[in-house]
Amino acid sequence: MTLPLYGTASLSEGFGADKARSVVRLRAVESEMERHAADFALVKTPDQLERAIAANWQSIFVVSSDPIDPISTDVFKRHVVVPAKYDYLAEGDVLGLDHSSGKFRTLFRRNSTHNSFLVTERCNNYCLMCSQPPKDVDDRWILTEIKESLALVDPATHALTFTGGETLSDWAEFIDLLKECRQRLPTTALQVLTNGRALANSRIVDAWREIGHPNLMAAIPVYASTDSVHDYVVQAKGAFDETILGILKLKDRGQRVEIRIVLHAVTAPIIAETCQWIARNLPFVDHVALMGLENTGFAIANDALLWIDPVDYREALAEAVDHLTSAGVNVSIYNLPKCVLSRSVWPYALQSISDWKNGFVEKCDRCDEKSSCSGFFTTGRPRFSRGVSAITH
């Protein structure tokens, strides 16, 4: 099942009219850490509610389908109540809450290794398979929310991803945010998903270099070795030239770059040729990710154009990996279960699907490789290969 990361609170009271949204961090009732203004005691049982009163908590976040005792809630200045299906929420998690509607979204989960912040829904590409279809909206408030959230994120967090839309739509503000990450999260691996086109601008790429975070990576898609195919996939004329120039300028300034290639019926049949071109022309990139398609967003609308059974490009994918590894390029395969891959590439196949949308089918229960397999997306309208089967040794 897909983990519900957003919803509407059944009760939300005590928030002022001076701002439209708040960022909330959940704390265990017994937490002895200094309390931040955004901290709420996480309450899931009547006993925890009583302990929160005894500990003089002023704000509580209740996960329960049962009504709260109205007398008890009189002691709290702010309280939020959400249904029991959000029981996964835990100590250190961070949420964004809209005051008027009560709508909330989980922004950060402390116990997850797959945390990402959506920076914007705007984009200057219009990719055929986009999982987050772009919108022409003014959503700059999201950057403010992320900045507030960074102060609440556990500094021990291993990795954070920033995604969009095009993350560099408001590039100056976003780069300032990444500089704040350098101060607050210096040991956290930061990955920024960007189409790379803005980085063709020397002013922007110089600002990127000045961020100075020791573990910052730009993840940029290159869908073919020819401009016509890449531009067709992203539905933007001239995008290929800007993207490649952005990659070259980043590497010229000593910055880390990952190339991403989503595999579908347009890109998969030529994946060996594309990776041979990368190996010859961009061997200095830090990583190449070959990614199975998430069948959601525009991929559903373009299903007839995009769907291809991974079994049908299995050999081409293995050849693509060979081209890259022979040139000394680090490569990984994301989002594809081992049973549809050639055994030669199993060492490169990672468990990459975010935990909140990762699942397995019944056949997987008998598979000896399940513990090290990517499994499947549970989002959108999943498509399954005819090659899905249990691997037994």
Image: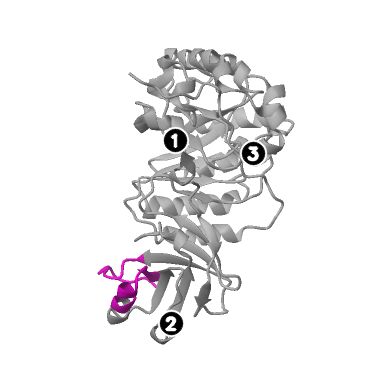
CA–CA distance in space, label 2 to label 1? 41 Å
Q: Is residue 200 above or below residue 331?
A: below
Q: In the rendered image, which quarter contains the C terminus? A: top left
Residue matched to label 3: 130
Q: Are marks 3 and 1 in contact (CB under 8 Å)?
A: no
* SS at badge 2: loop
Mark 3 or mark 1, earlier in chain: 3
Instruction: Assess whether residue 18 is covered by the magenta stretch.
Output: no
Q: Residue at x 62, y 40 (%)?
A: 296
Of 305 and 212, which appears nearest the observer? 305
Q: Is residue 118 above or below residue 334?
A: below
Number of numbered labels in the structure image: 3
Q: Residue at x 34, y 66 (%)?
A: 27
Amino acid carrying label 1: it is: Ser
Residue matched to label 2: 77
Specify the segment rendered in magenta: 27-51
Label 1 crowd (10 A; few <14 / some 14-19 / many >=20): some
Of 94 and 80, which appears nearest the observer? 80
Picture coordinates of residue 317, whole percent (x, y): 52, 17
Report the colour scheme: one colour
Residue matched to label 1: 352
Amino acid carrying label 3: it is: Cys
* SS at badge 3: loop
Label 2 crowd (10 A; few <14 / some 14-19 / many >=20): few
Q: Residue at x 55, y 61 (%)?
A: 7
- Residue 387 seen in the figure: yes
Picture coordinates of residue 221, whole percent (x, y): 58, 31
